[in-house]
Image: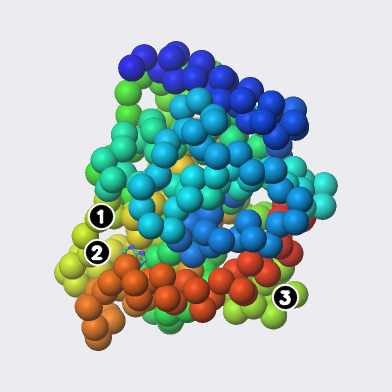
Amino acid sequence: MPATDLYERLETAAQAIAEATDRPRHDVVVVLGSASGDFPEHLDEAVAVPYPRIPGFPVPAVRGHAGTLYSTSFGPNRVIMLSGRVHAYEGYSTDVLTFAVRASLMAGCHTLVVTNAAGGCGDGMIAGSIVAISDHINLAGINPLVGPNDSRLGTRFPDMSDTYTPRLRRLVLDVAAEQDIAISEGVYAWFLGPTFETPAEVEMARRLGADLVGMSTVPEVICARHMERQVIGLSVVTNLAAGIADHRLTHEDVSATAELVKEDFSRLLIALLPRI
Ligand code: HPA
C-alpha cells in the first residue's frame, strides 16, 4: 500500500477520534499494556470509544486486551488511552499494529507514554518492579518505517538518540520518588515472540546491554520518533527472563505478577500524566 494512502487513513482516523470524543485535539497518548489493561477503571469521566468505531483501528485478539480508546483529562492534558494493543507476533503488519498510536499522534498528541510487561535480565532487576525505559535494542528484525517514506509523517532517516525524552525520564523518576514508588531505569530489547526467549537469547540480550526483554513497544516508539514526538516508556518486570528465572514461564504468571504491581503502576500514571 502506498505511504500516501497511510497518511490519509491516519487523517481520517484522527478526525473520527476528534468527533467521537468531542475534542478537537488531545495532548498525550498512553498505550496500556498487559500490565495496566484495567487502568481505565480509575477514570471517572472518560469517553469510551470502541476501536471498531474508528476507521483503520485494529481489533485485538489476545486475552487482556480490550480494544477501547478512552479520552479523559489529567490536569491540563487531554489524554487518549489505548486499551488493547496488537502485536507483531499476532501476524499484523507494522502499519496495522502502529496505526492507533500514529492516529492519536495525528490527533494532536505531543507525547507517547508506552507501557508494557517485560522479562527482567539486567543486574538488579526484580519481578514485580517498575522500570523506566532509557533506550531500546531492536532484535525483532523488523521496523515499521520500512517502505516508502511519507515526509508528511517524518524524515527518511530519523535520529534515535534520546529516543526516550531525557526531560521526561527525569520527571518519571521524580514523580515516582514523590509517590514513594520504587523505580529504576533500563534498556528494553524487543524480540518478535510469541515464544518467550531461550536462555541463550536472554544471555545475548543481557551481554548486549539489555535489562528488559519483551514483545512490544519498540514499533510504536519508532513511529513516535519518526513523527518527532516525545516518548516515555514504562515496563513492569513481571518475571525474570528465561534462564535467570528458575522455573518455566507462562502467560498466567506474567498476568498474576502484573496484577500485584497494578496499584503502584496506576498511582504512578495518575501522578505523572498531569505533569507531562
Ligand atoms: N519475555 C518476553 N516478553 C515478556 C516477558 C518475557 O520474559 N515477560 C513479559 N513479557
Q: Which residue is mark 1?
A: 193
Disc 3 residue type (three-letter): Gln
**What colour scheme does the image use?**
rainbow
Q: Mark 3 to mark 2: distance in Å?
A: 33 Å
Q: Which residue is mark 3?
A: 179
Q: Is residue 212 above or below residue 110?
A: below
Q: Is residue 273 above or below residue 238?
A: above
Q: Mark 3 to mark 1: distance in Å?
A: 34 Å
Q: Which residue is mark 2?
A: 196
Question: Mark 2 near ligand 1 (CB under 8 Å)?
Answer: yes
Question: Mark 1 near ligand 1 (CB under 8 Å)?
Answer: yes
Residue 232 or 63: which is nearer the viewer? 63
Task: Work out which quarter of the rendered image holds the N terminus and state it.
Answer: top left
Marks 2 and 1: in contact by CB < 8 Å?
yes
Disc 2 residue type (three-letter): Phe
In this rendering, does residue 103 appear at all?
yes
In this rendering, does residue 29 appear at all?
no
Numbered tag placed on residue 27 in the rendering: none
**Does dot 3 land on a helix, a strand or a loop?**
loop
User: Which residue is painted at 50% across and 74% down in the image?
Assistant: 259
User: Is 151 positioned to the left or the right of 193 in the image?
Assistant: right
Q: Which of marks 2 and 3 precedes in the sequence?
A: 3
Residue 168 or 209: which is nearer the viewer? 168
Q: Which of marks 1 and 3 precedes in the sequence?
A: 3
Disc 1 residue type (three-letter): Gly
User: Which residue is painted at 60% across and 69% down in the image?
Assistant: 265
**Does dot 1 land on a helix, a strand or a loop?**
loop
